[in-house]
Amino acid sequence: MPDKIATEQDTSRRGHSVSVGILPAHHWATQDPPPLEEIDEDDSALGSDTASSTASLTSSILHYRTLHGRRYHSERGNAQYWASNDEQQNEALDILHHVLTLCTNGKLHQAPIKKGIQKAIDIGTGTGIWALDFADQFPDTEVIGTDISAIQPSWVPPNLKFEIEDCTGEWTFAPNSVDYVHIRWLLGSIADWTELFKQAYRCLKPGGYVESFEPDSVMQSDDGTVKETSAMGQWGKFFEEGGKKLGRPFSVLSDRLQRKGMEGAGFVDIEELDFKTPLGSWPHGPREKEIGRYSRLVADQDTEGFVLFAANTIGWTKDEIMVYVSHLRREIRSPKHHGYYQQRIVWARKPE
Ligand SMILES: C[S@@+](CC[C@H](N)C(=O)[O-])C[C@H]1O[C@@H](n2cnc3c(N)ncnc32)[C@H](O)[C@@H]1O
């Protein structure tokens, strides 16, 4: 499972056919939801110690918009983001960080960066939780996290700061000034991945590293327990359809946008690490089970926040979305569905 480095065939996309499109909204109103299985006692106790607060930034940044009662980033400039930025979603992001570091056995980076590097930036930092951990591990490095939403904490290590910046525009960092660029979970936010990596290339010093960590939006199973017509099987289709409409693809893994973008930008020594991330407590191995239980907690923490924007984008009403979400929640909690999604970390060097 997650510790296995998959081959290219493994990640060539879903072990099943992709012929089924997105089911119409009314489909879910006619289905009986699967019986709600008991969640393990432990799971409800996981991940309650998250904290995120609003950094002190100019008030215009805090003009968010609301969609079906959930708070979203305001449409400033080019940026568009598909998940909400309120407390419920931010807590999910913090738990997600725990999942992602479990997946990498606690490693915050794969690129071979040295302890003494001067400057690292985290693009689309979210709640800044990766940047916080990285700044602690690299106390002599200046760390900057950027995002379009001001959802980062104000109490941070002295070597860390957060800036509001739209990464789809020209980055404000000086050319050849950065040692390491980290980018995680920006699928669905970026129209042109090559342009993103060109910005990283321009700002990196010769010999500096870029690293991109992205999931697949498609939930699959190896034993047929996640059918394409199930709520879990349909989940990725909202993102794919919504992403197409927004012009910001979710198909980062299947279209190999990380490697292609890095190659297009001029990076060399490109390396990849692929792994599966289970959803739910179904795996047998203790490590995989732990990852699965935490990733279920992420999905459970804000199932609606992960679906609302994409479903709204393709024209579903709030009521239709909520009926679908109730099916999805039940499936996610049921141990009968052995779902997982692929993730890929790609890192590369700017030539000397
Ligand atoms: C799924 S979250 C990932 C957060 C963080 N990288 C992590 O792994 O915990 C995606 C983040 O990207 C930010 N984002 C989306 N579009 C952006 C843009 N154009 N420029 C900067 N940040 C953006 C969102 O506001 C959100 O905080």
Image: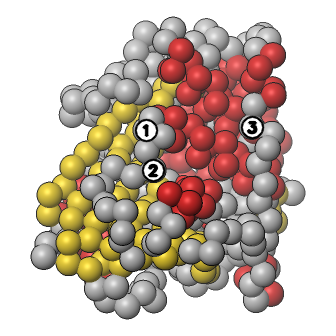
Residue at (35% x, 43% y) in the render:
344
On screen, residue 65 versus residue 240, left or right, reads right
Can you tell which quarter of the image residue 264 is in? bottom left
Q: Which residue is mark 2?
A: 108
> Which amino acid, mark 3?
Gly
> Which amino acid, mark 1?
Thr
For marks 2 and 3, give the one nearer the viewer. 2
- Labels 2 & 3 near each other (Cβ < 8 A): no
Residue at (45% x, 19% y) in the render:
221
Quadrant holding ligand 1?
bottom right
> Which amino acid, mark 2?
Leu
Q: Give the farthest residue toward the right.
A: 69
- Of residues 17 and 188, the one drawn nearer to the viewer in this rendering: 188
Q: Which residue is mark 3?
A: 47
- Labels 3 & 1 near each other (Cβ < 8 A): no
Camera sees residue 24: yes
198 in relation to 319, above or below: below
- Labels 2 & 1 near each other (Cβ < 8 A): yes
x and y, in percent, of residue 89 in the image: 73, 51
- Of residues 149 and 234, the one drawn nearer to the viewer in this rendering: 149
Can you tell which quarter of the image residue 206 is in? bottom left
Please report whichever mark, 3 or 1, sits nearer to the chain's N-terminal start.
3
